[in-house]
Amino acid sequence: MRKTLVVSYLARGERSKTKKILDAFISSIKSSSVESLDLCKNTPDFFTPESLSVYYERNYGGQKIDPKRESVMKKMDEMAAQFKSADIIVIAAPMNNFSYPAPLKAYFDSILQKGVTWTIGSNGYEGLMKGKKAAVITSSGGVYEGESAGYDHFSGLARAQFGMMGFGNIEIISAAGLNMFPDRADEIVAAACEKAKATAENWYA
Ligand SMILES: Cc1cc2nc3c(=O)[nH]c(=O)nc-3n(C[C@H](O)[C@H](O)[C@H](O)COP(=O)(O)O)c2cc1C
């Protein structure tokens, strides 16, 4: 059976607009086990001088590391293994300061491990997650189109990271302008919920 991993950072809990869109996606999941990782409860580690040394020696140098020293990578390794085991990844987080929230960046730093989700082959960088799908669900106060498109460092970064891992199908589902157009916020969220449902119905058909 397919496995779906839902990784969320929704610090507003039940008040979160992004959560409404995520719930719409989840309601249309079929024939898949679903595992959830709540980054509000399970905060990813940052690289420290110790863990970065282990990462370089092990993932780039191919060295066997003493288990006691290697244990500094435990949480990153567990998150990377969980990520790798899924067929469909769903990310849900709001835009914070033109990008995604810091815990989600630490999560991507945890799972983007050389030799696990990507590698460097004879033809250069190569993704190791080919054939898998990713949905990125988000909402923002502003709208990032036309001249302001360059301020959106959320969707481009997520697309680049999933692309580097070889994901062929990356769907960004965004409710944009919720603070800019408060009178239309419900309508904008409803349209994103419809897109989330349509994406899930297509993927889980
Ligand atoms: C700390 C913080 C930073 C934010 N930064 C941005 C931003 O850079 N651009 C933007 O359009 N909205 C920004 N917003 C607004 C949120 O992205 C927007 O209200 C979003 O819909 C909140 O999602 P939620 O209801 O799921 O928490 C920010 C909100 C907070 C709390």
Image: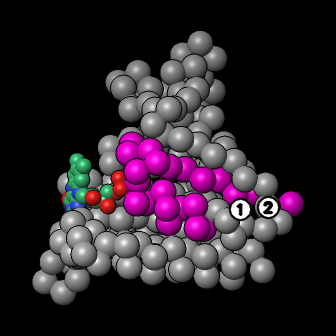
Disc 2 marks which amino acid? Answer: Ser
Total numbered labels placed on residues in the image:
2
Q: In this view, does 104 lie to the left or right of 196?
A: left
Is 47 covered by the magenta stretch?
Answer: no
Q: From this viewpoint, which residue is outermost toward the top?
A: 68
At 51% from the left and 74% from the top, the residue drawn is 193
Instruction: Give the Cα distance between marks 1 and 2.
Output: 9 Å
Q: Residues within 10 Å of mark 1 (few under 14, many from 20)?
A: some
Q: Disc 1 vs disc 2: Cβ atoms closer than 8 Å?
A: yes
Q: From this viewpoint, which residue is outermost toward the bottom?
A: 146
Q: Where is residue 57 in the image (x, y as percent from the top left)?
A: 50, 32
Identify the secondary structure beneath mark 1. Answer: loop
Return the residue at label 1.
87
Write down the region rendered in magenta.
1-25
Return the residue at label 2.
32
Query: Which sits in the foreground, 42 or 164?
Result: 42
At 44% from the left and 26% from the top, the residue drawn is 51
Viewer-side label of 1, 2: 2
Residue 62 seen in render: no
